[in-house]
Amino acid sequence: MADRLLFSKTGRAKYISHLDLMRTFQRAFARAGIQIKHTEGFNPHPFVSIALPLSVGYSSQCEILEFGLLDGVPAEEVPQRLTAAMPEGILIHKCYPAERKLKELASINYIMNFEYSEGRPQECEPAMQELLSRESLVVKKKSNKSKKGFTEVDLIPLIRSFNIECQSDTMTLDAVLSAQNPGLNPELLRAAFCEAYPDYAPDFVTFHRREVLDTDGKIFR
Amino acid sequence: MNRTLEHILPKVQKPARYTGGEYNAVVKDKQSVTTRFALCFPDTYEIGMSNLGCRILYGLMNEQKDIWCERCYAPWGDMEEEMRREGLLLYGLESGDPISDFDIIGFSLGYEMAYTNVLNMLDLAGLPLRSAERPELSPLVIAGGTCCYNPEPLAPFVDFFVLGEGEEVTLEYIQLYQQAKEEGWTKAELLEEAAKIPGIYVPSLYDVSYNEDGTVAAIVPKDGAPATVTKRIVQDMDKAYFPVKTIIPSTEIVHDRVMLELFRGCIRGCRFCQAGYAYRPVRSRSPKLLAEYGKAACQDSGYQEMTLSSLSSTDYPCLMELCDDLLDYCAPRDIGLSLPSMRADTFSMNLMERLQRVRKGGLTFAPEAGTQRLRDAINKNLREEDLLNSVRTAFSGGWSGVKLYFMLGLPTETDEDVLGIADLARKVYFAWKECSPNKARGVRITVSTSWFVPKPHTAFQWDAQIPVEEYQRRVNLLRDALKRDKSITYNWHDPQTSYLEAIFSRGDRRLADVLEHAWQNGAKFDSWSEYFDFQRWMDSLEACGLNGDFYAHRVREKDEVFPWSVPSVGVSRAFLWRERELCYQSVTTPDCRTRCSGCGANKMLEGGRTCG
């Protein structure tokens, strides 16, 4: 099977799009002098694949990239050498042979920070509790496949667990969300909250991926 | 990262353009440097990051311990709107600090249609537009690039212009600035001293007076400023800085590959071409050094593509040797090598097969004119037979598309010349029929015409741009002539921007008011159709009491005082006039390797060396 990298994408690197990130990895492997497998075919190029693309602007400490390490560089040297060849904000933590299938990656732990520059309203915590404890929460989601341009999706079954913590000007939502088939982009939670409770809409929300988990809720690698 | 910026970025398109942090971006401790430089490019990140000159200056400034050079590009409209709403000032990409706090703000000017972006960026930085309204020593606002050979429309906004190649003069004026800062000089004192550095043109040290007919009466230097400012050149290309280790963007840019600069200048002497005159004399890098640079740049960047750049790459004397050397490195690593700026007469199958092993897409040639007579008149020195041989070679080798570039409105052009373009395109089509090994694939021949813009410091600096109705008539003539040829596509350039280019490229200082007026009324990104508004410019000209036709469509007298009389590219006015006369006799001038025509540029080479 393939090799994997565990990496984080934070700070300025948050704004690198998925496609640009793949290109950045292809070039970084070359810069670092790490030989990797190429695709076959008419126009061969270095093969890299990133599991579960991260939205632009989100940070993450648990991104997984698949590739094929060719003989030459020991796996334990890869993180340090590759990190040195990366733009600011991308850190490679680990390089290891893949042992599990990516489809076993079932859920993602997101940390969402709701920021209130003028101070957090007391009521936003019970409001969020109420929203996420509903029987169902159907929202419209943009879709290119649907003729109407959107589809309807119920968020509640896609939320595995959540916890809310508040400070004077922030509310932090720590939530485990379905990762794939279908996955839940936490932006939909933000939008649903702002729609249900416009008075408690935050000034800004940050999104961070803290961990990827398997069906048992254990760390996936 | 700045909190305001972090809140803005999720709302704008392609936010990676505004963050910095790319591989090889230089971050220094601001306490440890004495001079902070904002290298500004008045267009988008994608275009500015593709500019080799900026990469050279960025690299060589940051090699200096006491200088920190950062980059700054024009934000796209959505970003500008957010910045203005949130009160976020234009900032350097490396530090995120407002460029108004920097010591020097330097613009790269390559294109007249970017002028309004210069004004817009100064405004976004929170600075007054006009030099006179910025009495403090810093930030100093300066500019370099090809437009500086006639920078007059920007004269009131910019403290000084740097003419020619910046490798040496940049460090010279920074040193002067550092001295000025230490010793507490006024800005006026600094500018007076700066004017003594060869290649630096301080527009405020010249009084321009006008005749009643609107032409320049005199340009009088004051406070000891020189009557002529000659551009700077690098004497020895092998000793010049080359950016082997350079910023690799994390998002896609226009020229996203290793750029290897073979040589500067051009031996050809096409009479319409400003670059051909302005970059003289010809100076080459040695092939051995280039191969080393190329390999090292691929290694450091991880790029899978390299392009050999110059004004006319096939005129590089050791091209084959260099290509072979580079291919030995590139081929096993799947790195593609491309060669733009090829002349149609020197195209060789041998070369093309080495370069484009995979993709056989289109080829582009620029005959510029449709008949031999007119090609001789503009000194393009390309023979029809050579072009046809080249396309025959290409078609036989499996290429199935050719793009042909021409200009309409060149001096002495007649209808016969216009129709000659159609004839030439048809001959190219017949060459395909004759040579293509696979006719079932069909052929794509594209003819593109632009509206000729006479440029300063060329043989045609005296000539008029033809009126727009006449341009349109010639377009229609050619379109009708090509109507029945199904395999030939005809595209023509929109005349509105060409008209404005013609005004500003040979404009004087009075046009500064037009720029400011247009900018106040929303002009920016004028080379982008999303923003360009022709009527706005017409209104601004009228509001300022100026007539665009005066600049674009007027033939100049032989001895007229040009607004660009002070800047010199090292080519004599007498030579340019001689070239113009030869044009009107349809007589060619040989290329610089065949025979020196005495343009004067070789005088810039130290030690009596010859061009090459």
Image (cartoon, grey):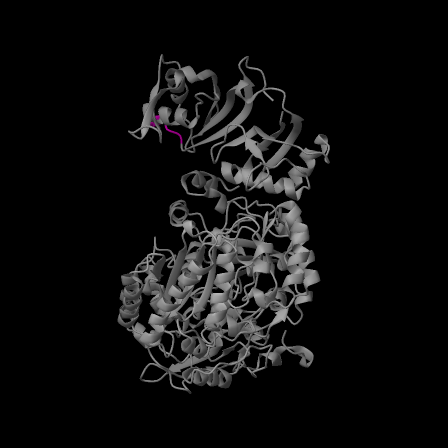
Whether residue B170 can be seen here: no
On screen, residue A36 above or below B286: above
Q: Which x, y percent locates residue A182?
A: 43, 21
Whether residue B21 can be seen here: yes
Nearer the observer, B440 or A44: B440
Name which residue lies at 49% across and 46% down: B17
The boundaries of the magenta stretch are A198-202
B178 horizontally vs B433: left or right: right
Name which residue lies at 64% across and 62% down: B320
Quarter of the view holding residue B448? bottom left
On screen, residue B509 above or below B91: below
Q: Which x, y percent locates residue B106?
A: 52, 62
Residue A200 forms part of the magenta stretch? yes
Q: Which x, y percent locates residue B93?
A: 53, 49
Dominant SS type (magenta): helix
Name which residue lies at 54% across and 50% down: B256
A154 horizontally vs B231: left or right: left
